[in-house]
Image: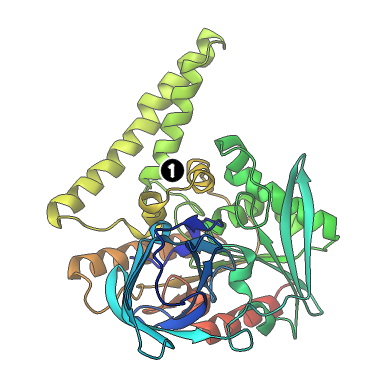
């Protein structure tokens, strides 16, 4: 449902099934044009080794700078096929007679016509250069990639969605530098940042937020504005709940779901399951007084288990009403993520209920999920996004809630002009 490509993380070329075929080594590029969200530029880099084996990488130029290893690349005559398993992508194409085009079908949820064109070193798409790239230590043996796009004025820090790096903002951030000094942080476990063991302790929402605070301190920034997309909302809420005086304001870019502001009325099976698991772990560990263990059991029986049961009952209603209903908007990443660091982030989600600083929350209400989506899926998305937008409006004093109809989850891409305008309006009013 959502275009949450944030949890897709892999940066090593994989061996492929190579055949001695036409010379297809080099760079190929094309644009995926779907009816949902913005068009996506894709570069396919094929390498031919001395053994004549072929390896390949796929790069999404408007999202991640990281490459994804291609699986199962086969070339038979003029026909070419490959898959990118972490992204659930397949491509079937045919090389033109002059060797300049590979035309075929790109399947990513739904099949779409797609054409790769051979690129040269001069014409191949590359990410725009950044002003400064640095690595800042935030914990022993943990350094984070920090991008500085430059600019002057109030500092603004951009946080990416799950699986993405700071470079997802390479096209967006420069549009802010005429007024602000803009930075981006790649969270631990992704991109070029350090990847400590994928445990809940290492990737809890509070731990990730503490990393951001370490970067702020290292850069000596005075009360910056933090803007975060998708899962990054939990980092914003962690800081806004615990250290509101260290920042000037928070901007949620379609990030205002249960990981950012929790309420029993909206619930979240993943977050409530996390609570149950933590409490079961406490009981499984020897130690603690009988009174402490009794308190944990009471919390399980009286609060945590009933909340999780309510969530699961709601899900069962969905399954019964619409067979094979896709994951809900606020937990879609939970069903798709396969990578240890991303799983650890999900398992480390916490509950935030008291955000005490200026907030701008921009929601896609509803999301653009395509004209062919089931009516029940569209209705569910509208109900969920409306509920979360209303929760922000009712629970956070002085919040500005903006609802953009039929925007993609990557709202800063699909509705860039609207988002830039709202950011400027919000920051201009900050003390």
Query: What residue sits right under mark 1 in the picture?
Result: 271
Secondary structure under tag 1 reads helix
Q: Left or right: where does residue 309 sit relative to residue 203? A: left
Identify which residue, 89 or 312, lies in the foreground.
Answer: 89
Image height of 152 relative to 352, above or below: below
Q: Residue at x 41, y 21 (%)?
A: 298
Image height of 125 relative to 329, above or below: below
Q: Position of residue 175 (x, y in %)?
A: 66, 84
* View extreme (bottom): residue: 98
Q: Left or right: where does residue 212 sit relative to residue 54? A: right
Q: Residue at x 66, y 52 (%)?
A: 239
Q: Left or right: where does residue 359 sit relative to residue 8? A: right
Q: Position of residue 346 (x, y in %)?
A: 48, 46
Q: Position of residue 195 (x, y in %)?
A: 64, 45
> Quadrant of the image for the C terminus?
bottom right
Q: Residue at x 57, y 50 (%)?
A: 354
Q: Left or right: where does residue 200 sit relative to residue 106? A: right
Residue 99 in sight here: yes
| Quadrant of residue 71 within the rendered picture | bottom left
- Binning the other alpha carbons within 10 Å of mark 1 as few (below 14), some (14 to 19) or many (20 upward) gives many
Looking at the rendered structure, the number of numbered marks drawn on it comes to: 1
| Quadrant of residue 382 within the rendered picture | bottom left
* View extreme (top): residue: 290
* View extreme (right): residue: 220
> Quadrant of the image for the N terminus?
bottom left
Q: Position of residue 75 (x, y in %)?
A: 35, 69
Residue 295 in sight here: no
Identify which residue, 190 or 236, lies in the foreground.
Answer: 190
Q: Residue at x 38, y 66 (%)?
A: 2
Image height of 119 relative to 55, above or below: below
Image height of 241 relative to 222, above or below: above
């Amino acid at each position: 449902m959502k275009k949450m490509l944030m949890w897709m993380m892999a940066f090593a070329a994989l061996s492929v099934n190579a055949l001695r075929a036409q010379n297809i080594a080099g760079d190929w590029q094309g644009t995926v044009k779907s009816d949902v969200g913005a068009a996506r530029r894709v570069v396919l880099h094929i390498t031919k080794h001395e053994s004549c084996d072929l390896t390949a990488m796929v790069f999404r130029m408007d999202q991640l700078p990281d490459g994804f290893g291609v699986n199962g690349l086969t070339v038979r005559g003029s026909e070419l096929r490959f898959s990118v398993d972490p992204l659930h992508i397949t491509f079937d194409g045919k090389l033109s007679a002059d060797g300049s085009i590979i035309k075929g079908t790109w399947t990513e949820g739904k099949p779409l016509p797609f054409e790769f064109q051979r690129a040269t070193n001069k014409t191949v798409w590359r990410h725009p250069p950044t002003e400064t790239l640095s690595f800042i230590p935030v914990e022993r043996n943990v350094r984070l990639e920090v991008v500085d796009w430059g600019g002057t004025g109030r500092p603004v820090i951009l946080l990416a969605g799950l699986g993405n790096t700071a470079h997802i903002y390479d096209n967006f951030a420069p549009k802010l530098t005429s007024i602000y000094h803009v930075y981006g942080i790649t969270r631990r476990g992704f991109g070029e940042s350090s990847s400590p063991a994928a445990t809940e302790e290492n990737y809890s929402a509070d731990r990730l937020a503490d990393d951001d605070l370490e970067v702020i301190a290292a850069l000596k920034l005075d009360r910056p504005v933090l803007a975060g997309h998708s899962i990054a909302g939990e980092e914003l809420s962690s800081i806004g709940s615990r250290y509101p005086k260290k920042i000037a304001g928070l901007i949620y870019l379609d990030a205002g779901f249960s990981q950012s502001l929790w309420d029993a009325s909206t619930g979240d099976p993943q977050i409530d399951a996390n609570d149950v698991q933590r409490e079961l772990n406490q009981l499984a560990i020897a130690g603690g007084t009988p009174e402490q263990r009794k308190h944990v059991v009471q919390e399980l029986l009286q609060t945590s288990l009933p909340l999780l049961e309510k969530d699961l009952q709601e899900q069962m209603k969905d399954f019964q009403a619409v067979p094979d209903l896709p994951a809900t908007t606020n937990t879609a990443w939970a069903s798709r993520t396969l990578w240890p660091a991303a799983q650890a982030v999900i398992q480390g989600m916490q509950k935030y209920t008291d955000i005490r600083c200026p907030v701008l929350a921009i929601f896609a209400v509803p999301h653009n999920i395509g004209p062919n989506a089931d009516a029940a899926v569209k209705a569910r998305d509208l109900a969920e996004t409306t509920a979360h937008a209303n929760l922000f409006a009712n629970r956070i004093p002085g919040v500005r809630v903006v609802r953009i109809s039929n925007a993609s989850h990557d709202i800063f891409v699909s509705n860039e002009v609207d988002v830039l305008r709202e950011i400027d309006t919000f920051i201009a009013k900050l003390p």
